[in-house]
Amino acid sequence: MEDEQGKKLCQLAMAGDNNGVTSLVNAGYDVAYFDNNGLTPLMHAAKHGHADIVRKLLDAGAPWNALSPSGLCAGDFAMDNAHQDAFDVLLNAGVQAELVLGTIARKEKENNHPNGCYLEDRVSFSEDKLMDSDSKAVMMAWENPLMEAHAKAVCSRGGHILNIGFGMGLVDTAIQQYNPVSHTIVEAHPEVYDRMLQNGWGEKKNVKIVLGRWQDVIPKLDSYDGIFFDTYGEYYEDLREFQQHLPKLLKPGGIYSFFNGLCGDNAFFHVVYCNLVSLELESLGYATQLIPLPVKDCLPEPVWEGVRQKYWQLDTYYLPVCQSNDDE
Ligand SMILES: C[S@@+](CC[C@H](N)C(=O)[O-])C[C@H]1O[C@@H](n2cnc3c(N)ncnc32)[C@H](O)[C@@H]1O
């Protein structure tokens, strides 16, 4: 019986029968139903661009972030089929939901450190990647062009530069090419730190290395003309928390950027998080520009050999450049 109801709802959503969907929703049909192809009524409505039905289903509690067997959500279907109205409704729903969830997560966080394990485990270095003990990539060489672009952005005003997270030192190598007045690097992993010293980073005249988690060493930091943030094993909440310190850490007119790997395995979730982070930065007084950089060519399949998780699967990288609204 439930199956029949769910199928009916999917059919009407696909056909764009607004009144039909309304009466089934009012009759209590399951809006979170998955049909035989693993699609929900919301996905069907999105795929066919029925924005009013998308709105109705969301209002009735349909999950905006449910995934099809091939890992696509309703927003991906709207996006792939160029249904702008349905896409906008879903984007708004996603951003609102994550804003609320963020509030809940912040309340629940209570000082637990998500990356405690990573920082205590061994890491291994090779020419093209830095891996954790779980065969997940901490950093990979394919990101080099991205790191060069980040360095160019945060060094565009010269002066004093701060980088959080050394990894393979790609961004720091690029920053050095701009000859900053000072270049502070915060790194929390003891083995990464040792390797920095072995490779001579401790002897560079303009470089200051701060060993520790950024959360713990922030009181030791100054204020900077350019800041880049790229850690590992942390959550969106940590990025958000770091950004709360920008008004103190970033000089007036300074540039802030961060590695934008937010939900890098799903195109629509990535758009939701790009919007969310821009909104949160705006509430702190910063305008964010997202500069598209094509990355498809840097990522032939063999790049991921031996890596447990493909943390990036999209064709375009959106490089964030943030600056105080007062400075525009
Ligand atoms: C993705 S890598 C950075 C890659 C770097 N941008 C590059 O160009 O090679 C992340 C680095 O952040 C460090 N890290 C992780 N959590 C940290 C924290 N809370 N504070 C400071 N560094 C942290 C990791 O040990 C790792 O070296």
Image (cartoon, rainbow, N blue to C red):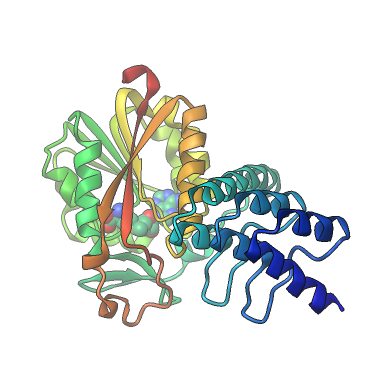
Between residue 156 and residue 222, name the one nearer to us.
156
Between residue 117 and residue 70, name the one nearer to us.
70
- Reply above or below: 167 against 308: above
Residue appearing at x 70%, y 48% in the figure: 108
Residue appearing at x 66%, y 68% in the figure: 40
Residue appearing at x 71%, y 54% in the figure: 18
Query: In the image, is 10 to the left or to the right of 47?
Result: right
- Give the x, y percent position of residue 59: 74, 49
Query: In the image, is 35 to the left or to the right of 144?
Result: right
Q: Which image quadrant for residue 136?
A: bottom left
- Reply above or below: 309 against 188: below
Q: Which image quadrant for residue 249?
A: top left
Query: In the image, is 104 to the left or to the right of 221?
Result: right
Query: In the image, is 78 to the left or to the right of 229?
Result: right
- Reply above or below: 28 against 110: below
- Give the x, y percent position of residue 140: 28, 66
Residue appearing at x 60%, y 50% in the figure: 51
- Give the x, y percent position of residue 255: 30, 32
Between residue 324 and residue 43, name the one nearer to us.
43
Q: What quarter of the picture does the C terminus occupy?
A: top left
Is residue 6 in view from this perspective?
yes
Is residue 263 in view from this perspective?
no
- Give the x, y percent position of residue 230: 37, 51
Q: Which image quadrant for residue 316?
A: bottom left
